[in-house]
Image (spheres, rainbow, N blue to C red):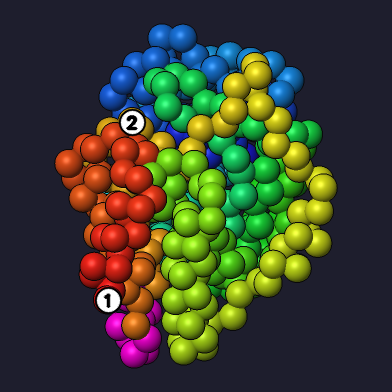
Amino acid sequence: MRYIIIGAGAVGGTVGGRLAEAGHEVVLVARGAHAAALRGGGLRLRTSEGTRTHRLPVVEQPSELGELDPDDVLFLAVKTQDGAAALDAWGGRPVTGGGTAAERLPLVCAQNGVESERIALRRFRHVYGVCVWLPASHTEPGEVSAAGAPYSGMLHIGRYPAGTDETARRIAADLEKSRILAPVVADVLRWKYAKLLANLANSVEAVTGPMTGDEAGNLYARARAEGEAAFTAAGIVWVGDEEQAETRGDRIRLEPLDGSPRGGGSSWQSLDRGTGSIEADYLNGEIALLGRLHGVPTPVNDALQRVANAFARERRPAGSMTVAELAREIDGEGG
């Protein structure tokens, strides 16, 4: 199988680099300065084993690849807010032997939140969800850092909305050979909803910096309590902390690279790169949506969504608001 990594950032770059190291055919899809750096100097993947440079095919548009192969796998790793445009661009591409990518090829959605797969299923027939647990950073064009060792991460994979099949098992086997743990599960949404609860802290970290101290932890606890209440009202089940800890165990440890600590998470990185957008609508905003649908108040998540989006829109620096200031914003909106 050839893997077309749509969005060669932190997650996509790590997965693409690791697959390439294991001998799999990989194409990276990127844009702007990152695409230019990948073409000019290759993908520099920094791990605990050192830095490896992978000189892989790089495209910015699907048309640069011509017809796709029936054995291609589309691995979608852009942020959810960029997903629909990417799916529209790739879905209509012809596949050798007839049909289009949307009709014939597997689409693997590796994003935070739970909306990307739903967006994809409107366009693609064969959609696979992934619960991403992969500590990686992309803040410089051409470079990705992955701090997990001896495996770079764990990606639970399954058909969307539920089930497993041979394609999922083949993809998982390729990932496992590439230093990425990949359990195949029939209930991938249960894992993704659990990850969504953890990701409610992303906006706090993005606007205030590292999650240290009781005050930041308290804001996250309040956001998570709203999330759990909304899930319960909606009849949504999720994997508990004990099951997650048992599954991951001590199989992956975080190792500082070259003596330097890892940067912030995915939302923090979006602000740090000044992309102009952030995934808050599909994290805190998902809880706000469920709350409105099921009559559950979500003032903390409402405020976190609003503040994070303002930071992205105004290109304010990551971590430039104090936790106390954020708390006042939240309490001012939520009462």
Q: Is residue 67 left or right of residue 51?
A: left
Task: Tell me if I can see residue 25 in this picture.
Answer: no
Q: Is residue 266 left or right of residue 44?
A: left
Vertical relation: 313 (above or below) 193: above
Residue at left offset 78%, top offset 34%: 150
Q: Is residue 142 left or right of residue 302?
A: right
Name the main secondary structure of what is drawn in magenta.
helix
Which amino acid, by three-letter code, is at mark 2?
Answer: Arg
Disc 2: which residue? 273
Q: Element at badge 2? A: helix
Q: Element at badge 1? A: loop
Coordinates of residue 37 in the picture (x, y in percent): 39, 15
Coordinates of residue 305 in the picture (x, y in percent): 30, 60
The residue closer to the viewer here, 45 or 277, is 277
Disc 1: which residue? 335
Q: Tell me which segment is drawn in magenta.
A: 288-296
